[in-house]
Image (cartoon, helix red, strand yellow):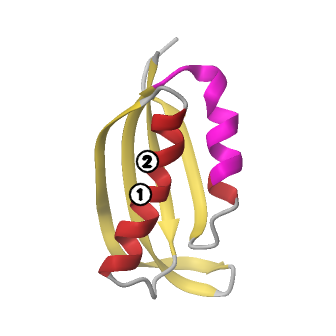
């Protein structure tokens, strides 16, 4: 298993319940693919963009650190792209291999 960090940009109009729901939807595919979540938090509430993303001028940045097998990353990306509350995502490897 490798360690990864994912940064999500969520819609700015989400309330606390909506953010909690998205956080649950982010963690589910990781656990389903035999991964473990170590950190899951709002990194920055409502940060302004330099350019609009899907017609939004700001968004909520959400950070997740997790460990999972590398072959499961594509499955995670596919699951996250289906969630309409996620505007953008970036997953990167924390190990230098």
Q: Residue at x 49, y 57 (%)?
A: 25
Q: Main secondary structure of the magenta part?
A: helix
Q: CA distance from mark 2 to mark 1?
A: 5 Å
Circle 2 is placed at which residue position?
A: 27
List the residue tagged with mark 1.
24
Residue at 48% x, 53% y: name it. 26
Q: Quadrant of residue 15?
A: bottom left
Q: Callout 2: few (<14), some (14-19), or many (20+) C-alpha neighbours within 10 Å? A: some
Q: Is residue 42 above or below residue 40?
A: below
Between residue 63 and residue 57, name the one nearer to us.
63
In the rendered image, residue 84, in percent from the top left (x then y), is placed at 64, 72
Question: Residue 92 appears at what percent x and percent y?
Answer: 52, 35
Q: Residue at x 55, y 86 (%)?
A: 57
Q: Confirm whether the magenta stretch covers residue 72.
A: yes
In this image, 17 relative to 77: left or right?
Answer: left
Classify mark 1: helix, strand or loop: helix
The quadrant holding residue 14 is: bottom left
Q: 10 Å neighbourhood of mark 1: few (<14), some, or many (≥20)? A: few
Q: Secondary structure at mark 2?
A: helix
Tag 2 near tag 1, CB within 8 Å: yes
Q: Position of residue 61 (x, y in %)?
A: 41, 65
Picture residue at 40% right of the left edge, 59% below the top: 23
User: Whole-percent x and y of residue 6?
Assistant: 47, 45
Q: Which mark is residue 1?
A: none
> Which residues lie in the magenta part?
68-79
Above/below status of 8 relative to 38: below
């Amino acid at each position: 298993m490798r360690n990864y960090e994912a940064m999500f940009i969520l819609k700015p109009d989400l309330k606390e319940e909506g953010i909690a729901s998205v956080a649950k939807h982010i963690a589910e595919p990781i656990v389903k693919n035999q991964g473990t979540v170590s950190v899951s938090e709002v990194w920055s509430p409502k940060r302004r963009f330099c350019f609009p993303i899907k017609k939004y001028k700001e968004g909520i940045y959400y950070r997740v650190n997790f460990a999972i097998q590398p072959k499961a990353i594509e499955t995670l990306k596919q699951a996250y792209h289906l969630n309409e509350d996620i505007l953008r995502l970036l997953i990167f490897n924390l190990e230098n291999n």
